[in-house]
Amino acid sequence: MVSWWSLLLFGVFVLVETETLAERHEDQRDLLLQQLMSRLEKLEADKGRSQVAFSASLVTTEHETFQGPFETSSSLVFRKVTTNIGNAYNPETGVFTAPTKGLYYIRFTGSFGNSNVLNAAVLKNGENMFATYNTVGHHSSDSNGMSLVLEEGDQVWVVLWASSSIFDQSRLSTFSGFLVFPM
């Protein structure tokens, strides 16, 4: 026979174990909640750095504008900014500076100037990444683009090589890029 003391002790044991399990579940729940909040804060902090896109055309006027040919190579400054999410493109210098490490897609399109030669390149920190070269003729265009892994602070710009020229009127010659994904 089971005594009432045994039943009472068993009941106290079950009650203590139930409270201990509840405390463990509450501790686990609190830990999971802290981890989720930490991840959410990190995502919110990274949100601004992971939204990067720019697009600019060579001139701000709607009139025919020619640049070049020059005796030496010359950096191009695309002054009419259409998009600059993240403010990583500088329309005063023509330089895009990567705000975060990631895979970026960069594109350059140029219309031929009065030399009938378009010879331009996109440089990353001064190194030629890709180029366009064409001699088709007046008011033709050429374009090229590439995915580039950029480190935070890497700089990308367009250079027009010596003896060539470029033309713009209403966004015919453009320099654009965007962050595909951060790394």
Image (cartoon, rainbow, N blue to C red):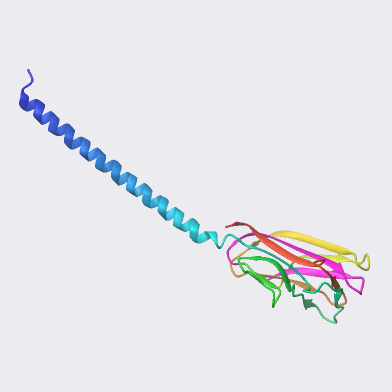
Q: Residue at x 37, y 49 (%)?
A: 33
Q: From where the camera sits, is residue 165 visible?
A: no
Q: Indicate left or right for 89 with 40 as reference.
A: right
Q: Quadrant of residue 154?
A: bottom right
Q: Which residues are magenta?
A: 99-125
User: Please, what is the dominant secondary structure of the magenta stretch?
Assistant: strand
Q: Is residue 151 left or right of residue 144?
A: left
In the rendered view, would you say 50 is above or below 74? above
* Residue beneath the point at 60% across and 70% down: 153
Magenta stretch holds residue 37: no
Residue 53 in sight from this viewpoint: yes
Asked if residue 112 lies in the magenta stretch, the reply is yes
Instruction: Where is residue 90? Give x, y as percent.
Output: 66, 73
- Expressed as whole percent of the image width and height from the top left, the position of residue 22 reads 25, 39
Q: Residue furthest bottom?
A: 71
For the N terminus, give its image quadrant.
Answer: top left
Among the 4 quarters of the image, the one containing residue 15? top left
Q: Identify the residue at horizontal 81%, vertical 62% (top origin).
A: 143
Position in image of residue 121 (x %, y %): 78, 69
Quarter of the picture holding the C terminus: bottom right
Q: Is residue 147 above or below residue 24?
A: below
